[in-house]
Each structure stands twice: as C-alpha cells, then as structure tokens.
C-alpha cells in the first residue's frame, strides 16, 4: 500500500523545487511495472524509481498537463514504468497543503494506479543539508487523501538520499534540471534529465 | 607585452559581467543567484569603472540578494542608494521590499503608505502592498485591491497579467480570460497572450470554449510558428472537438484535418530537435505513439 522513493526520485524532486524557489512546481513519480500480482502484494511497498518534473508557475491550466500526462504515459509503457505518484510544492513556503490541482491530478493517477501517492513538499524545512525528509505523503483511501508520516522508512536508502541530494544542491545541479515547461520552450531540453541521473549514479 | 595583455583580459571580463547584468535587467530575468554572483563581484572589484551604471546595478543586485536571503548584501546596496539618493521614493520602495523579505509585513506596509501619502499616484508602492497580500495568502483581498488599482491604472499590463494569474490560481477561468482579453486587445501581436488565453478557454471546457481555444492556439501559431504550446494546444483542442458526439460531420472532418496538420508539424519539430542526440530519440518515439493512439480515439 505504501510507496518508497529511490535517491534519484527524491533528488530530482528537490532540485526542481530549488530551481524555482519563487514558483509552485509539480511533477510525476514513476515506478517499475510489476510483472504479476504476488499473493502478498499489499505488503510489498511500491518503489518510485524516478521523477519527471513537469511545470513551474501556473499549475492550474489543463492543456499542457494533458499533453505531459499522455506523453509520459506513452514513455512509461516503452520503459515498463507506470505513473505511480504526483508531487507539488506550493508557491508560498508556508503553504504545504494539497490544493485542488494536486487532488485532481492525484485522483486521475489513482484511476490508473490504485496505490498512487500524492506528495507535498514542505519548503519550510528545505535546507542545503537535507537533514530530514521534507515530504508529506498522501495515500488515496475511499476517495479521500490521508496523510502518512514521512520518515527514513519511506526511502530505499535515506542516508544515501540525504547525502546525494545535499551534494547536488551544493553543486547547484538544479540549474541544469529540465522540466516539461523547459522542454516546451525548447524541444532539445530532455525531461528525463540523463545528465543529472548520471550525477546521482556517480555519487552512489 | 604580457602585462598589457593581462589588463585587456580583465577589461573584457569586466565588460562581459556588466553586459550580462544589463541583459538580465532588460529581459527581467529572475536568475537571482547568478545576479548575486556576478553583481557582488562587480560591485566589490570594479565599482570605479561602472560610472553611473552603478546605481541601477545596486538596485538590481539588492533585489536579487533579497531573493537569495543575502540580507548583508542587500543592506550594503540599500545604504549606498540611500546615501546617493536621500529621500527618493524609489529607494524607499526598495527599503520596503527588504522588510517584506524579512516578513515584516506591517512595517513594509507602513513604508509604502508613507510613499503614498507623499505621492498617491505611486503605482509601485500600491503594487507592493498587493504583493504583501499575496505573500500572506490573502488571495481574495489581493484580487479585490488589484481590481481597484486597475480601475485607475487601466493600461498597466503587468497588473492585468498578475490579475489573470491570481484568477487562474483561484480556478476563476472566466475572469482570467477577461484579463487576457484586455492584454490581447492592447498587444495584438503578442503570441504568448493568445496562447495563454487559449489555455484558459480550454480549461474552462465545453464545446464552445474548446472551439475558441482552437482558434486562439491557431492565432498564436500564426504570430509565432515556433510556439510549441500553441501547436500542442491546437492538436489537443481539435482532437477533442473531432471526438465529441455533439459535432456534425462537417465540423468533425475539419477538426480531424486540423489535428492531422498539427500532428505533422509536431512530428517535424521533434525530428528537427532530435537530430544527433541519442536521448531524444525516445521522446520522438513517445510523441509519435501518443499522436497515433489519439488518432484512433478520434475516428
């Protein structure tokens, strides 16, 4: 029922928020497609292996969001991934509650993936050192989003995630992070962020 | 000989930095970290060479410093400006912005009120007061104040655009569209306003709004055929109209044609972009497949 995050997924989420500190940002989380339903599948956590940063600024408009969701869905099928979650950081630092946009997109993802998670980034605790996880994870239960405590257990390897995210923030890697908005500005910009993925692997 | 060369290099570096700052000023770029990096060095090492440019650079660097929580740097810049321009409203406004950055909203508001007492038409001070409301999450009040402001200053495009964004965030798409209509009227050649208007109409939904959105996406493309959002938007709106059970055969046929045209253009754009890069091949394929799958739903 619960999701876990890899270092790469957590890292890119925070880099996206760091790149646009004065804007709201959002994006998707993807997990590897499970081949077959194991008997005790409800106890195996879903591992979100990657994150696709989507937009910054105005999040409440539909057309580009639809394009992104459809395009990324197609890309997922190619790579045996599935869209497993949605993250958002609000424009105002002190505001980390999910709003209508987050709930709508979250619900849409939950239609195709029952264990979808909605993640809100708590910018008030955002530091260069990344000493604690700054996410609030919401699970979809009976048409409502319930907040779950986010601690080291929500990560594949919290120590690694903390170390690498902090290093990339110090190195200002967020300057080269590409989101879907950047891609629409110039198609050569690659929203899969291969260079940053390499940096993460390099530091592992 | 070597000595002269060294000095030339330093001069080049200095002029590059100064030109970068000017470009960022002109483009209204909010790349605050870079501005602080370049600006701080320029101010510390090359102040004497800047001439009168230094004052506008102090202002630019101060605002960027506030963005980066560099109150030390912001304070320094502010003191220099206060010394040079005592009693200036423009400098008073900067002092107010610093108070905002420190979240001292009441003090900031008082600062702006004092500017307005001396000069009730000071638009910058009024807009800062509205920004305070926005920072405090008081969207309804910000919207109300901004509407009042626009009744008086009906030509302020920055304000109309800000208002459209506030309305979009409140999901009041009808009023957002109205703001963008104002902007399109006064800026008929601006493809971005056309495209944003189309996005708002699309989001509002319903067949009529979809057709309007398609028309404005097309208009945006006419004004700038490189606008990918407009191209994708044209594709999406035409596809949805063609797939709608409410349209007759003629309308459906026309929209299938528009969507097909857009598909071609999108594919071409991706081919052009993907040339030579291995990574982008994946994007191209994903786009092709996405477009193919949507064709099926339309027929």
Image (cartoon, coloured by chain):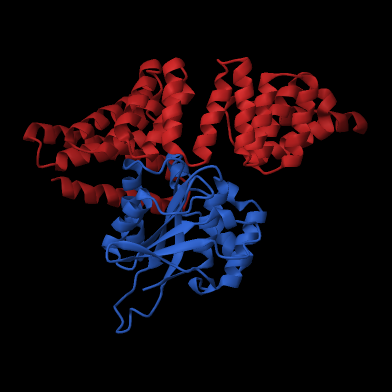
Chain colours: A blue, B red
Question: Is any atom of residue A31 visible in this view?
Answer: yes
Quick check: A152 above or below B115? below
Q: Is residue A157 left or right of residue B33?
A: left
* In this rendering, position of residue B298 left or right of residue A62: left
A8 vs B226, nearest the viewer: A8
Give the residue drawn at x 45%, y 66%: A49
Q: Where is residue B30 drawn, in percent x and y?
A: 59, 35
In this orientation, does residue B267 appear?
A: no
Residue at 56%, 47% (x, y): give it.
Answer: A19
- Residue shown at the point (23%, 51%) measured from the top left: B293
Instruction: Decide which of A142, B240 is in the foreground and name it.
Output: A142
Q: Residue furthest bottom?
A: A39
Residue B295 screen position, x and y as percent: 20, 46
Relative height, residue B109 to residue B299 (above, below): above
Task: Where is residue A27? Give x, y as percent.
Answer: 43, 53
Quarter holding residue B272? top left
* Residue at screen point 78% across, 29% down: B79
In which quadrant will I find the C terminus of chain B? top left
């Amino acid at each position: 029922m619960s999701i876990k995050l890899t270092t790469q997924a957590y890292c890119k989420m925070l880099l996206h928020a760091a790149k646009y500190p004065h804007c709201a940002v959002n994006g998707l989380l993807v997990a590897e497609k499970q081949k077959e339903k194991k008997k005790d599948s409800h106890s195996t956590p879903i591992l979100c292996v990657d994150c696709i940063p989507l937009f910054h600024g105005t999040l409440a408009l539909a057309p580009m969001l639809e394009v992104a969701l459809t395009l990324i869905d197609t890309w997922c099928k190619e790579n045996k991934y599935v869209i497993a979650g949605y993250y958002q950081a609000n424009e105002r630092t002190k505001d980390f509650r999910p709003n209508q946009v987050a709930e709508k997109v979250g619900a849409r993802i939950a239609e195709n993936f029952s264990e979808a998670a909605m993640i809100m980034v708590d910018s008030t605790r955002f530091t260069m050192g990344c000493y604690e996880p700054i996410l609030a994870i919401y699970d979809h239960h009976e048409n409502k989003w319930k907040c779950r405590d986010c601690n080291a257990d929500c990560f594949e390897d919290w120590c690694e995630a903390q170390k690498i995210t902090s290093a990339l923030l110090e190195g200002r890697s967020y300057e080269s992070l590409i989101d879907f908005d950047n891609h629409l500005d110039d198609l050569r910009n690659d929203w899969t962020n291969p260079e940053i993925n390499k940096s993460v692997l390099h530091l592992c | 000989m070597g000595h002269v060369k060294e000095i030339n290099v330093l001069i080049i570096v200095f002029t590059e930095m100064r030109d970068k700052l000017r470009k960022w000023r002109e483009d209204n770029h909010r790349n605050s970290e870079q501005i602080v990096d370049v600006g701080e060095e320029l101010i510390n090492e090359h102040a004497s060479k800047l001439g009168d440019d230094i004052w506008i650079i102090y202002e630019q660097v101060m605002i960027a410093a506030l963005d980066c929580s560099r109150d030390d740097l912001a304070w320094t810049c502010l003191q220099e400006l206060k010394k040079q321009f005592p009693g200036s409203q423009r400098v008073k406004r900067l002092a107010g912005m610093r108070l905002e950055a420190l979240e001292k909203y009441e003090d900031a508001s008082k600062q702006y009120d004092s500017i307005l007492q001396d000069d009730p038409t000071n638009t910058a001070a009024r807009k800062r007061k509205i920004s305070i409301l926005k920072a405090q999450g008081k969207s309804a009040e910000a919207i109300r104040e901004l509407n009042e402001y626009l009744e008086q200053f009906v030509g302020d495009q920055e304000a109309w655009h800000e208002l459209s964004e506030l309305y979009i965030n409140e999901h009041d798409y009808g009023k957002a569209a109205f703001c963008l209509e104002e902007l399109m009227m006064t800026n008929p050649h601006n493809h971005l306003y056309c495209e944003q208007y189309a996005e708002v109409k699309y989001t509002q939904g319903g067949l009529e709004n979809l057709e309007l959105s398609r028309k404005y996406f097309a208009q945006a493309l006419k004004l700038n055929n490189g606008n990918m959002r407009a191209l994708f938007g044209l594709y999406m709106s035409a596809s949805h109209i063609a797939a709608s059970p409410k349209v007759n055969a003629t309308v459906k046929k026309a929209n299938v044609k528009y969507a097909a045209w857009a598909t071609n253009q999108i594919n071409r754009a991706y081919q052009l972009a993907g040339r030579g890069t291995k990574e982008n091949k994946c994007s191209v394929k994903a786009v092709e497949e996405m477009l193919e799958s949507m064709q099926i739903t339309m027929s």
